[in-house]
Amino acid sequence: FFFDQPKVFFMHIEGEGTVDKLAGAVKKMYDTVKAIRGPNAKPAESFAEVGELSLPEKSSITAAPLNEIFRMQGESKDGMVKFTIGRPAKMHGVKIDKEMGVNTWAAFAGDDKNAVVDGDFAVTEDELQPVLKSLLKNKINIVAIHSHMTHEQPRIMFFHYWGRGSAKDLAQAVNGGLLVGGLLKVSSPIE
């Protein structure tokens, strides 16, 4: 819906098990929704915390500590730093990866103490849940899950994320997602 207020989102769920186990899991989900809605009846319209400082007008992220965390050189421009990690795949028998947009990336803006990270992960369906859980545990918000292609091998899912905090803490959270998913091992071209 385009103009609904408050914004309504839909989520499909799936599970396997006994009826009792499935019903119990669904009840836990509804109980969690109720607990969240109790003190927050009106949905938030941003990820900003009450009293949180605005980002500086001009970004000044120091790349060196982030380069160390990601073990690679980030691209620096206008005080922002971006890391791009290719995800090899094939589509209709043709190799595709980083330069064709099949990649995980993280862009940092703000300053070292007050930063945002925005990015996209490219994962297989089996990697999706572990990486999501790792990022959510580290207070990185997931804002979209989708696919970009058809007939790619392996099947690649993409998800966008957003986080606020110190640049170093955000980099460690994103790198944790890369490690949990084993994504640093698959960043070389496939044969």
Image (cartoon, helix red, strand yellow):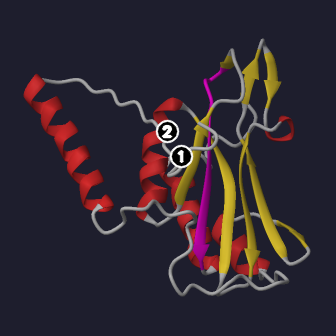
Secondary structure of the residue carrying numbered label 2: helix
Label ID, residue 182: 1
Residue 22 vertical placement versus 162 (above, below): above
Q: Position of residue 56 (x, y in %)?
A: 77, 86
Indicate the quadrant containing the N terminus: top left, top right, bottom left or bottom right.
top right
The answer to whether one can see residue 53 in this image is: yes
Q: Residue furthest top?
A: 92
**Magenta span includes 18:** no
Q: Amino acid at mark 1?
A: Gly
The residue where tag 2 is placed is: 127
Name the foreground residue: 157 vs 146. 146
- Labels 2, 1: front one: 2
Residue 85 vertical placement versus 174 (above, below): above
The residue at the point 11 percent across, 23 percent down is: 18
Residues rendered magenta in the picture: 153-165
Indicate the quadrant containing the C terminus: top left, top right, bottom left or bottom right.
top right
The residue at the point 72 percent across, 24 percent down is: 149
Q: Position of residue 81 (x, y in %)?
A: 80, 69
Q: How many marks?
A: 2
Secondary structure of the residue carrying numbered label 1: loop
Q: Position of residue 11 (x, y in %)?
A: 43, 35
Q: Amino acid at mark 2?
A: Glu
